[in-house]
Image (spheres, rainbow, N blue to C red):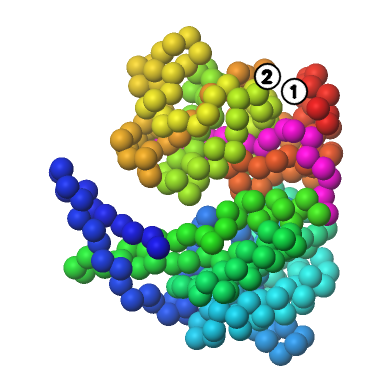
């Protein structure tokens, strides 16, 4: 159960959990901003009818052209909604690329290619719906239903997960917290492993370059990559260990760096550069990376990197059809992208090592 406290000088005051809003309200919020679930999606349909008589609450598309089906529990029992989302998933699985374009055009009132470029800053993939994800949104789930979702995801590699919302109230103020039953990135990776190329050992990392907050030039100069504004994002850096080779991507620019991880993730205020200077004492272009330094939930985290080759953001390297997604960190499997990157960054680490 998620709990929330307000910090008052030298003590903590717990904020009471409030009765959850109905799932229709949650659907409204997710439709407007999927990022509240940590998802980088373009919503392309809402309450869309299937060929089996049901209606899908929300359907989104990600940067890879894969679909995510989002279903709110509403007043159904957890087991009923699991059965429903599996039924809907069987329908989504059969959607062709032209059909996806048609569904999206009807909802967005514009060509999907145009909306996709506006949302992700890149050309839409030629083939869509190579894979799909199933997400149940609920206020709560009984233990039996949780076990079913875990079984489908962990034992059978189905990309299915549950997102929970918890409401808190303090006077006239209301707060919303979101959490997943399973690590969503691991769920997706398990599913991808069944259909995609084997992992070669390279990791994909999002730079998160955001002038004023975290600057790529600071990362290049002082040897690190960062992620922050909430443990939901920063905890992804925990997947990296010393010795891991990484390629760094910046949205809208392309790939901008290759290096070897030199340390575990630490709070930005605790990071020490290779020449022994704490990050708190160097001259940063974007000192905002040291925001909320003592709050382990909000602060930026960084991972040390020995850079082998980097480029400024304006010189990012990209090719049509290259791999990119919203994850802070993930395993890089895309053969064409790996071939491109090993040439551009002159990587002499043998693939498959």
Q: Nearer the viewer, residue 345 or 131?
A: 131
Would residue 315 be visible to someone looking at this image?
A: no
Left or right of 99 on screen, residue 81: left
Q: In which quadrant of the rendered image does the N terminus lie?
A: bottom left
Residue in view at x 57 percent, y 35 percent: 207
Q: Position of residue 211 (x, y in %)?
A: 46, 33
Q: Is residue 178 above or below residue 288?
A: below
In which image quadrant can residue 170 be found? bottom left
Q: Position of residue 52 (x, y in %)?
A: 75, 87
Task: Compare marks 2 and 1 and give the one earlier in the sequence.
Answer: 2
CB within 8 Å, label 2 to label 1: yes
Q: Is residue 259 above or below residue 178?
A: above
Q: Is residue 232 above or below residue 76?
A: above
Which SS type dominates the magenta stretch?
A: loop
Q: Secondary structure at mark 2?
A: strand
Would residue 152 be visible to someone looking at this image?
A: yes
Q: Is residue 67 above or below residue 320?
A: below
Queried whether the magenta region covers residue 169, the answer comes back as no
Q: Position of residue 222 (x, y in %)?
A: 50, 18
In which image quadrant can residue 112 be found? bottom right
Disc number for residue 345: 1
Left or right of 50 on screen, residue 326: left
Residue in view at x 58 percent, y 74 percent: 145
Figure disc tally: 2
How many C-alpha atoms fall within 10 Å of the one at disc 2: few (<14), some, or many (≥20)?
some
Q: Which residues are magenta?
A: 195-214
Disc number for residue 309: 2
Q: CA distance from mark 2 to mark 1?
A: 6 Å
Residue in view at x 49 percent, y 41 percent: 234
């Amino acid at each position: 159960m998620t709990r929330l406290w307000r910090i008052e000088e030298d003590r903590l005051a717990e904020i009471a959990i409030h009765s959850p809003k109905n799932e229709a309200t949650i659907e409204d919020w997710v439709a407007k901003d999927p990022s509240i679930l940590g998802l980088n999606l373009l919503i392309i349909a809402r309450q869309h009818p299937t060929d089996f008589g049901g209606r899908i609450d929300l359907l989104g598309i990600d940067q890879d052209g894969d679909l995510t089906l989002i279903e709110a529990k509403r007043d159904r029992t957890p087991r009923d909604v699991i059965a429903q989302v599996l039924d809907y998933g069987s329908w989504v699985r059969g959607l062709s690329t032209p059909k996806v374009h048609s569904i999206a055009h009807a909802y967005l009132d514009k060509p999907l290619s145009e909306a996709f470029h506006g949302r992700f800053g890149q050309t839409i993939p030629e083939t869509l719906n190579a894979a799909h994800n199933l997400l149940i949104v609920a206020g709560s789930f009984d233990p039996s239903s949780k076990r079913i979702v875990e079984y489908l995801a962990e034992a059978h590699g189905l990309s299915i997960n549950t997102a929970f919302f918890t409401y808190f109230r303090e006077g006239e103020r209301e707060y919303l917290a979101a959490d997943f039953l399973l690590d969503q990135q691991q769920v997706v990776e398990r599913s991808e492993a069944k259909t995609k190329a084997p992992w070669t050992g390279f990791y994909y990392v999002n730079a998160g370059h955001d002038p004023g907050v975290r600057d790529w030039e600071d990362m290049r100069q002082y040897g690190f990559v960062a992620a922050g504004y909430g443990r939901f994002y920063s905890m992804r850096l925990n997947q990296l260990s010393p010795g891991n080779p990484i390629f760094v991507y910046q949205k809208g620019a392309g790939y901008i760096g290759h290096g070897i991880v030199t340390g575990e993730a630490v709070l930005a205020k605790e990071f020490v550069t290779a020449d022994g200077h704490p990050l708190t004492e160097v001259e940063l272009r974007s000192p905002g990376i040291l925001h909320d330094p003592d709050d382990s939930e909000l602060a930026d985290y960084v991972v040390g990197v020995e850079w082998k080759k980097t480029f400024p953001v304006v010189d990012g390297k990209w090719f049509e059809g290259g791999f990119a997604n919203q994850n802070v960190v993930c395993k890089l499997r895309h053969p064409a992208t790996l071939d491109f990157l090993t040439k551009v960054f002159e990587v002499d680490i043998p693939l498959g090592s």
